[in-house]
Image: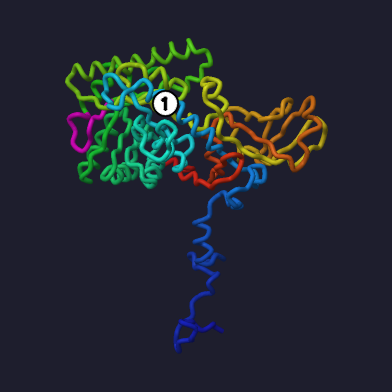
Amino acid sequence: MRRPHRSGGNATAGAVSEPHPRLLLLGKGFVLFSPQRRRRLRNATMERPIFQPVGTPEEALDTPALVVDLDVMEQNIDTVHGYFRRVKPDTVTLETEACVRPHVSCHGCPEIMQRQLSSDEGRFDEPASCTGGVAVSGLGEAEVVVGAGINDVLIAGRVVTRPKIARLVALARDNWLFLAVDDLQNVRDISEAATAGDAIVGLLVDVDTGYGHGGVAPGDDSLKLAREIEEMPGVALMGLTSYEGPMAIADRGELEAQSRQRLQRLVDTLEMLEQDGLEVQIVSAGSTCNYDVAADISGISEVQAGVYPLMDMETIEVRPELQHAARVLATVISHPVAGRAVVDAGHKTMAPDFGVPTLEGFPGAVATRFSAEHGILELEGQATEQLLPNDKVRLIPRNLALCFNQFDYVRAVRDGKLVGYWPISGRGRLG
């Protein structure tokens, strides 16, 4: 017997009843999800944090928690941006000056991006004179950045499929968008789509200066691609870009020598383009590891420093003037024997692909191995009597970008107390 259809609380005579709301027709079968639950599932995120009130002490946060110390972060930003302010006047010209273009893929957090773009001599409420937009790795991240109100974006990765090129063109209509390219057919596809879509996409020739990650060979090959771009509609040759590689070289002399060797190939290519009569507005290179070296090379117009606001262990070994502002707060859940403790932060939290995290504040305690949900700490000395269940520990990630991609939110703290939850909107936006 069918249940009568209800509209406004009254049954309508002769109306055909609908299936029970928990039964949605799927082919010839049924799925036990109501429309409301399907919407909830669509809107669900992988992380469902317990939102605790502002002012909660850091040690009382629910774990595992990704925590950023705002005081340290702002000091890091001011240190790096201060270098550019110190050596560069206000007016930017390609021949003599560089600005910093934050590469924000490492954190994907719009709140942090805004602070990077508004830092000027310790002030975080006005546009910074030393920044020139942001850089990201992929198109999905660029869409997040534009959605956050930032309209000057360099995409360092490739956009090659037709659906993605269509998204790229749509984004370029109302924003300053620059894309790294290293393939002529890719350029033709972008030109065709941009022309049809009444847009202009700015292109940078990606020059392989030695890392072997991608890019065109420096010199003649780069010049040839630049000439092709110059002649095509719908695209504009904006300049050159390069990634020298991680450059995690602790020895200062070797870091500078390798950086200059690779960046000189980019500058030599720049000179070839200019001698050929091509206008070059942007030469973008460098990283946090060699930001000062890149900034001082004539011809480099912007430096793509990434991890500097937050830092991780692999970068802090190269740039000791910067401090780690990001850490994962975890709870000890077991101390089964004197020499071992277990915390609630595993692979899904720390993503230790490039190395295990460093434990802060407990000499003799070392993170050694991880399962999906748990981390194992080996204990020596006084640490064997410490780290009991319910104790908190702070883990500094070896690689920041991988760790941030495990979380939906940053817990922002100042003076040891929670001041807000900041969405990591770029998380998982890889396409």
- Res 243 quadrant in image: top left
Q: Is residue 71 above or below residue 320?
A: below
- Residue drawn where x is 70% and y is 28% of the image: 366
- Residue drawn where x is 79% and y is 27% of the image: 382
Q: Total label count?
A: 1
Rendering coords of residue 212 (x, y %): 41, 21
Would you call the spot at circle 1 few (<14 residues within 10 Å), some (14-19), or many (20 or more)? some
The residue tagged 1 is 82
- Res 235 quadrant in image: top left
Is residue 379 toward the left or the right of residue 315 in the image? right
Q: Can residue 122 be found in the magenta stretch?
A: no
278 or 297, which is in the foreground? Answer: 297
- Residue drawn where x is 72% and y is 32% of the image: 377
Rendering coords of residue 373 (x, y %): 66, 41
Question: In the picture, which quadrant includes the N terminus?
Answer: bottom right
- Residue drawn where x is 63% and y is 42% of the image: 58
Q: Is residue 159 above or below residue 279?
A: below
324 or 244, which is in the foreground? Answer: 324
Is residue 127 toward the left or the right of residue 317 in the image? left
Q: Which color mode does the image show?
A: rainbow
Residue with the most extreme bottom position: 13
Rendering coords of residue 78 (x, y %): 45, 29
**Which segment is the magenta one?**
229-239
Q: Can residue 236 be found in the magenta stretch?
A: yes
Q: What kind of residue is marked 1?
A: Gly
Rendering coords of residue 130 (x, y %): 36, 29
Q: Secondary structure at mark 1?
A: helix
Question: In the picture, which quadrant includes the C terminus?
Answer: top left
